[in-house]
Image (cartoon, grey):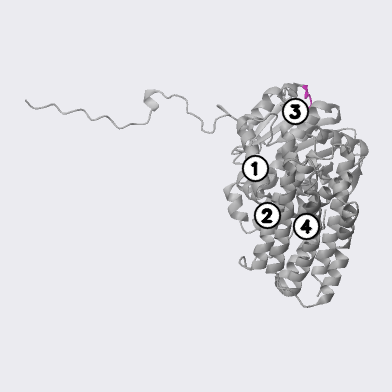
Amino acid sequence: MPLLRTSHQQIHYELIGDPDLPVITFLNGLTQNARLWTAYADHFVPRGYRVLAYDMLGQGRSSKPVIDIPLASHAELLDQLLTHLQIEKTHLASISFGGTIALDFAIRFGHRLHSLVVMSSFAELTPQLELLGAVMLEGLTDVGLPYLQSMLYPMNMSSDWIAANRERIPAMKRAGYISNDGYAMQNLMESFAAFKPLTADLDRIKVPTLILNGEFDFFTPRACHEVIRRNIANSRLVIMPRAYHAFTLEMPALTLRQLEVFLNQIDEGIWQGDQSVWLANDDPKIAEAWLPIHGDWMRAAQPATPMTDSTKPASRRKPTPRKKIP
Amino acid sequence: MIDPDLYDKARDHIAHAGFSPEVQTKIALTLCAAKAGNQAFHNAVQWLPNLGVVQQFMISQAARELEAINLLTRTTQWSARPNLAMTALRTTAPLTLAWTQIMMPPGPLFNPPAIYQGLSLGHAQLARLRLLPLIPEDANPFNPFVVALQRIEQDNGRMLQTQIRLLKRMGENIPLDAREQMLERDQQVVDQVFSEFMSWLVEP
C-alpha cells in the first residue's frame, strides 16, 4: 500500500486506474479502512474512473496519533494527499464519520471537487447523536474495543444481514480488533469535543451533492440528512429503501447504482440540484433509478389523505339501546 | 501495523497444537518481560515529588502490572525447555533495551525526559501486545490460562486509559510533534517484538 509522508505522519492510500481519468475518492466511516472500498474500485475502474481510498489518521495502516487528532486536520490531510498525487479535482464519496470530514472539505476546499456524495452522515450533532456518541465512547473507554464492536453491528446493520452473517461476525470482529486501535478510535471520537456545527457554512458548498440516507437508519436518521439537504442548494436527498446506517457494506449493488446514476447525470450535464427528495429504486423491473416520494419524507408512517363518506371503510355501528317496554 | 497473517498463523498453530506448555511458556515469558519493564518504571516514578493525584495512578499502574505478572505465572503450565527462556530473552531484547535506557541512572525519578519516554513505551505495550486474536474460537473458555489472557487484555484496556490521560497531560514542555514521534517510534519497537514473538510461537 503506497504511503504519503508528512512532517511526522504517514497516510496509506490505494489509487487504482489510469492517470488521465476522473478520480473518485472514498472517505471511510469511523471503524473502517481503505480496503472496504475494493468492490467500489472494481466497479468504477473498468467504467473509466480512477479510485482513491485511504486510511485516515487513526485508521488501519496510517499513523495513529495518541495525544491529539484535530478534526480539521482530516480535510487538510486530504488536500495534501490530492496535491501529492497531482489530482487537481475529485469526486468525493463519503460515509458517516467520513461524511462529516467530506462536508468540512467541501466547505474549505470546494475548488478541488467535481461533486460530493454524503452517506449516513451529519453536519451537526443532534442531541440524540451526541448522546449516542457519548455512550459509544463510554463503552470504548470503560469496557473496551470488543464491546464497541459488538455494539456497532446491531446499530449499523439490519436483522436480515445479522441473521445471514451471524456465523461470520466473530471473524469480522477479530479482523477489526487486529486492524483498529482502541486508543486511536477514542482519539477520533474525542475530537468531536471541539466539533463546531458545519450547518451555517453548508451554503458554501456549490458542487453537485447527492445525499444518501438509509430508510431505517436510527444512528443518523432523516433529520441529520435533512439539515444537509436544506442548506445545500445544489443537492438531492435519496432515501435508500429498508437500509440501515452501513448500507455501503450491506447493499453495495444498490449503493453503486446510486453513485453511478449521479456521476452519469453530472457527465451528461443533466444533473438537477433542486433539493428534491427521492426514493432509490431497488426493483430491477423498474427503469427509473429514483422514484418520487409523496407526503412527508420525515415521517416513517405516511398518513392517508382524508376520505369521503362513500370511500370510508364500513365501521361497526354503535348498537342502539333498546327501548324499554313500559 | 502488524501483519494480520501473523495473527492468523499463530491462532491456527494454537488451534492445532492447543495451549501446550511450550505455547503457554512462550506467551508468558514474552508478556512478563514487557510487563516487568512497565512495572519497574511505574514503581520508580510513583514517589516523584508533587505528583498530586497522578501518584495514585502511578501506584495503581504498578500494582496492576504486578498482578498481571502474578496471574500469568500462576496459571501458566510451564515447559521445562530452557532454550525457550533464551529465545524469549532474544525476542524481547529491544523492549528490555528500551526500558534499560529509560531506567538508566540517575533513573526517571531524577531524569524528567525519561518519565515521558516511560509513559510512551508503556502505552505502546498496553496498546499493541494483544493476545485475544490468538485464542482459537473453540478454545475452552474455562481454561485458566485463557481466562488469564482475557483478564489481562481487559485490564490492559483500562490501564491504557490512565496512560492516555497522563500522556495528554504531561510533557507539555516537549513539542507535540516530538511527543507523537516518540509514541510512534515506541509502537514500531513493540510491533516488531510482537511480530517476532508470533513467528516464534508457530515454531516447534
- The first of marks 2 and 4 along the sequence is 4
Q: What element carries label 1?
A: helix
The residue that label 4 is drawn on is B129
* In the rendered image, residues at marks 4 and 3 fall on the same chain: no
Q: Which residue is drawn at 58% across and 50% down?
A: A160
Return the mark for residue B154.
2
Which amino acid type is marked by label 4?
Leu
Q: Which residue is drawn at 62% across and 65% down?
A: B141
| Residue neighbourhood size for the residue with mark 2, other residues' Cα within 10 Å, grouped as few (<14), some (14–19), many (≥20) | some
Q: Is mark 3 on a helix, strand or loop?
A: loop
Residue picked out by circle 3: A271
Query: Chain ID for label 2?
Result: B
Q: What stretch is highlighted in magenta?
A: A204-209
The answer for which chain carries disc 1 is A
Q: Is residue B22 magenta?
A: no
Same subunit, labels 2 and 4: the answer reads yes
- Amino acid carrying mark 2 in the image: Gln
Instruction: Tell me the amino acid under the disc marked 3.
Output: Trp
CA gap between label 4 and label 3 equals 51 Å
With respect to residue A120, does B19 lie above or below? below
Q: Can residue B3 be seen in this view?
A: yes
For residue B111, above or below residue A271:
below
Q: How far apart are marks 3 and 1 (CA)?
A: 43 Å
Query: Would residue A8 appear left or right of A282 to someone viewing this image?
Result: right
